[in-house]
């Protein structure tokens, strides 16, 4: 047992430094190495938290990344196996997701709190913590808006002991991306102040209605914070205001960061390497489940049943309409949207009307938020065709012909040896690419429309 164990760790370290196709080298990679190691992998899965931390390589342990080494060819010299593993990973994550209905907030407000202190210039993450954070922040924002079209993001930076508003709360991804586009404007300097920055983030969310979520996501690279007062007071106020704080630490765990997350119901994670950093950052993309406790103790939301809220669907003005002033920027423009209640003209939806406060959304936005509440059920991997008298010959979505014989005998968890995945509702078969595409992108089964 001991040599085998060491062997598997060795492989893990090797694959960890990879950031491209295999992601952060999760345990799928080792799993594919053969049945012999199944036991070690399973055991590892059970005591996840600690075991994971022990076995994943820390950034400073990683040697120079030779990404071509980490992609393993199979006996026939093809990369198919590596790609399949990568897809199986996403599929398995989906199977682990809770099937029961949970209440989620679809109208989200998030402040992204970026550490811009001198410690972000550390090179333990390549090229620097700062550059990597900016790059991931951009990817995060794009993904976040894709999944939460009704949400809004603001950006606050912390450097030189103060909190600095970098981007106003906005529902337009382009606005947010523009705010962090210029890296020279964000040059890291001085010490960070968690308290100042959180206070600033909190104040920009204080006006929000109760039905929307208030979240702060901190990317924190420092090991110190210099605060003007007692940060525990700030924490208490955040708990009272139901602000959910999540922290992605790049250096190490700090007690105050852990406490901020635990008491407000957020997630805390220490990034061990580049891939892991991205993983824990992207954990904040799907909307958080609403906590029952928060609802019963909070004033005004004691009602456990769903609250109705008012939304307006705007009228879109054609580009040829006569120019008029918009209420958001006071600019003369032809295009825009009319608030259905007060007929004020706004430039972008979704937004809150600046005049009457009505929430203005377009119906596609609303529809796109629904898939979190009613996700497509995971497709079942078809293991054998013995029970099916008349199997479909091609994928129901893309019409690709299915292989008639099993391509591999190795059954990775969640993978079908026949390349078939079946919808549990309409019983149509789909190919592996379509399975991933249906669940990750279109969120609707082409066979039954559910
Ligand atoms: Zn405007
Ligand atoms: Zn209005
Ligand atoms: Zn297909
Ligand atoms: Zn279906």
Image (spheres, rainbow, N blue to C red):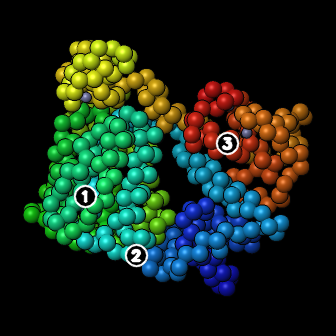
Quarter of the picture containing the C terminus is: top right
Task: Write down the quadrant of residue 213 in the picture.
Answer: top left
Task: Please give the name of the residue rendered at 27% of the width and 18% of the height, measured from the top-left corner.
Answer: 323
Q: Can residue 320 be seen by looking at this rendering?
A: yes
Farthest residue to the left: give it: 228
Q: Quadrant of ligand 1?
A: top left
Given residues 268 and 393, the one toward you in this image is 393
Above or below residue 201? Residue 443 is: above
Above or below residue 79? Residue 54 is: below
Task: Please give the name of the residue rendered at 12% of the width and 62% of the height, measured from the top-left corner.
Answer: 230
Give the label on residue 34, or none: none
Give the label on residue 124, or none: 2
Secondary structure beneath disc 1?
helix
Given residues 297 and 334, the one toward you in this image is 334
Task: Write down the quadrant of residue 357 in the picture.
Answer: top left
Task: Give the mark toward the camera: 3 or 1.
Answer: 1
Upstream in the sequence, badge 3 or badge 1? 1
Marks 3/1 in contact by CB < 8 Å: the verdict is: no
Quarter of the picture containing the N terminus is: bottom right
Please rate how many residues cluster around mark 3, counting C-alpha atoms within 10 Å: few if below 14, some from 14 to 19, many from 20.
many
Q: Is mark 3 within 8 Å of ligand 3?
A: yes
Task: Write down the quadrant of residue 18 in the picture.
Answer: bottom right
Q: What number of labels is visible?
A: 3
Marks 1/2 in contact by CB < 8 Å: the verdict is: no
Q: CA distance from mark 3 to mark 1?
A: 42 Å
Residue labelled with disc 1: 185
Residue labelled with disc 3: 435
Task: Give the mark toward the camera: 3 or 2.
Answer: 2
Q: CA distance from mark 3 to mark 2?
A: 37 Å
Q: Can residue 44 be seen by looking at this rendering?
A: no
């Amino acid at each position: 047992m001991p040599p085998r164990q060491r062997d598997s760790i060795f492989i893990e370290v090797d694959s960890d430094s990879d950031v491209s196709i295999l992601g952060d080298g999760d345990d799928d990679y080792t799993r594919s190495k053969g049945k012999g190691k199944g036991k070690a992998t399973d055991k590892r899965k059970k005591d996840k938290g600690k075991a994971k931390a022990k076995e994943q390589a820390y950034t400073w342990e990683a040697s120079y990344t030779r990404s071509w080494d980490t992609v393993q060819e199979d006996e026939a010299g093809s990369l198919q196996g590596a790609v399949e593993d990568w897809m199986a990973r996403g599929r398995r994550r989906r199977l682990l997701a809770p099937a029961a209905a949970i209440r989620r907030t679809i109208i989200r407000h998030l402040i992204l709190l970026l550490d811009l202190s001198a410690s972000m210039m550390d090179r333990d993450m390549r090229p620097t913590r700062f550059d990597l954070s900016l790059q991931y922040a951009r990817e995060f924002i794009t993904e976040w808006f894709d999944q939460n079209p009704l949400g809004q993001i603001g950006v606050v930076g912390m450097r030189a002991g103060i909190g600095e508003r970098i981007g106003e709360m906005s529902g337009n991804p382009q606005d947010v991306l523009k705010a962090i586009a210029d890296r020279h404007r964000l040059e890291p300097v001085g010490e960070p102040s968690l308290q100042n920055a959180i206070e600033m983030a909190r104040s920009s969310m204080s006006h929000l209605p109760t039905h929307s979520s208030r979240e702060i996501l901190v990317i924190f690279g420092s090991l110190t914070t210099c605060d003007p007062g007692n940060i525990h007071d700030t924490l208490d106020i955040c708990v009272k205001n139901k602000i959910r704080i999540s922290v992605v630490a790049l250096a190490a765990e700090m007690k105050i960061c852990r406490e901020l997350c635990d008491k407000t119901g957020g997630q805390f994670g220490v990034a061990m390497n580049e891939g892991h950093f991205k993983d824990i950052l992207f954990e904040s993309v799907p909307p958080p489940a609403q906590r029952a406790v928060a609802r019963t103790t909070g004033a005004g939301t004691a009602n456990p049943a769903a609250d109705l809220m008012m939304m307006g669907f705007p009228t879109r003005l054609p580009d040829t309409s006569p120019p008029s002033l918009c209420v958001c920027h006071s600019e003369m423009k032809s295009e825009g949207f009319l608030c259905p209640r007060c007929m004020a003209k706004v430039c972008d939806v979704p937004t809150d009307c600046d005049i009457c406060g009505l929430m203005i959304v377009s119906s596609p936005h609303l529809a796109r938020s629904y898939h979190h509440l009613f996700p497509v059920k995971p497709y079942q991997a078809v293991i054998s065709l013995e029970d099916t008298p008349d199997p479909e010959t091609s994928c129901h979505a893309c019409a690709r012909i299915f292989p008639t014989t099993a391509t591999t005998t190795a059954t990775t968890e969640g993978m079908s040896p026949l390349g078939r995945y079946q919808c549990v509702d309409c019983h149509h078969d789909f190919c592996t690419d379509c399975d991933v595409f249906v669940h990750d992108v279109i969120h609707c089964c082409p066979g039954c429309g559910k």
